[in-house]
Image: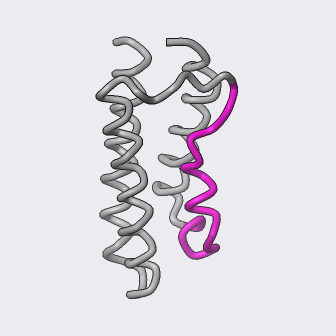
Amino acid sequence: MDKREELLKKLYLLIQEINEAKIVVDDEKSRYLNNYENGIEIVIKRLQDGTLPASKGGLIGAMRGISEYDSLASIKTLYDAASDVDVFYSRECQEW
């Protein structure tokens, strides 16, 4: 599996975790997660159409979106999925 496919797999897992988190959070956080999910879907689209640049050591920002709220960061599977996306992109996707 190439780096783009692996990143795409991790992004889809993050989308799954976002949707599971929406079930257990209040309405405000659920709306926030909807917006966050839209942002992740934009990253997926850019990855699929080839316009997502290589990381050059940077991050996508998946963790920043989760760490906005302590209650979201405390959902371990969501936190881990977001962390996995950022770490993989930063370390493994420095070049395509």
**x and y percent of residue 43 in the render?**
41, 41
Whether residue 11 sits left or right of residue 63 in the image: it is left
**x and y percent of residue 33 in the render?**
42, 69
**x and y percent of residue 88 in the render?**
55, 29
* Up/down of 71 relative to 66, above or below: below
* Up/down of 14 relative to 53, above or below: below
Q: Residue furthest front?
A: 51
The residue positioned 34% from the left and 32% from the top of the image is 9
Q: Is residue 60 magenta?
A: yes
For the magenta stretch, what is the residue range?
Answer: 57-74
Whether residue 8 sits left or right of residue 61 in the image: it is left
Location of residue 74 by image quarter: bottom right
* Up/down of 95 relative to 65, above or below: above
The residue positioned 34% from the left and 49% from the top of the image is 41
* Up/down of 87 relative to 78, above or below: above
The residue positioned 54% from the left and 69% from the top of the image is 72
Whether residue 70 sits left or right of residue 88 in the image: it is right
Q: Is residue 7 magenta?
A: no
The residue positioned 31% from the left and 63% from the top of the image is 19
Location of residue 90 by image quarter: top right
Q: Residue furthest right?
A: 57
Whether residue 91 sits left or right of residue 53 in the image: it is right
